[in-house]
Amino acid sequence: MSYKISDAVAMRFIQIFQEAIMLGVDGADLMRQVRLVVDPEDDSTVTLDPQYVSLVEEMHRQFLDRAEALKKEQDSQRLILEN
């Protein structure tokens, strides 16, 4: 049987490409982590596994938290240098 990929899978592949560039990591490693399931509404399509989606959302939350912490640290250092 052949399968199509859902729009969610296509968007995740694009997102992985962007993450690899921004983070300087090997995109192949991120691609290997993708988990797919047969779409319950269309058995000819595969879509992202809901547990995988949760993991990606958590990873993105951690990235944003770390970026915010780095920004605060940088702003704090800037204030010290300006005074």
Image (cartoon, grey):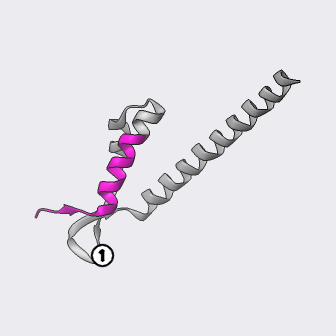
Q: Would residue 81 be found to the left or right of residue 11 on screen?
A: right
The residue sitting at 36% across, 53% down in the picture is 12
Helix, strand or loop: magenta stretch? helix
The quadrant holding residue 70 is top right
The outermost residue toward the top is: 81
Tell me which residue sits at (16%, 63%) in the image: 3
Amino acid under disc 1: Pro
Residue range highlighted in magenta:
1-18
Horizontal arrangement in the rendering, residue 17 relative to residue 66 (left or right): left
Residue 3 among those drawn in magenta? yes
Location of mark 1 (residue): 40
* Closest to the observer, 74 or 23: 74
In the rendered view, tell whether residue 62 sits above or below residue 5: above
* Residue in front for this viewpoint, 14 or 37: 14
Residue 7 found in image quarter: bottom left
**Residue 41 drawn at (x, y percent):** 28, 78
Residue 50 in picture, x, y percent from top left: 42, 64
User: Please, is residue 74 above or below residue 51 in the view?
Assistant: above
In percent of width and height, residue 78 lies at 78, 27
Instruction: Looking at the picture, tell me which residue is in the foreground, 24 or 81.
Output: 81
Q: Is residue 6 left or right of residue 67?
A: left
Going 38% across and 62% down the picture, which residue do you hit? 49
Q: Specify the quadrant that holds the N terminus.
A: bottom left
User: Where, quadrant-wise, is the C terminus in this rendering?
Assistant: top right
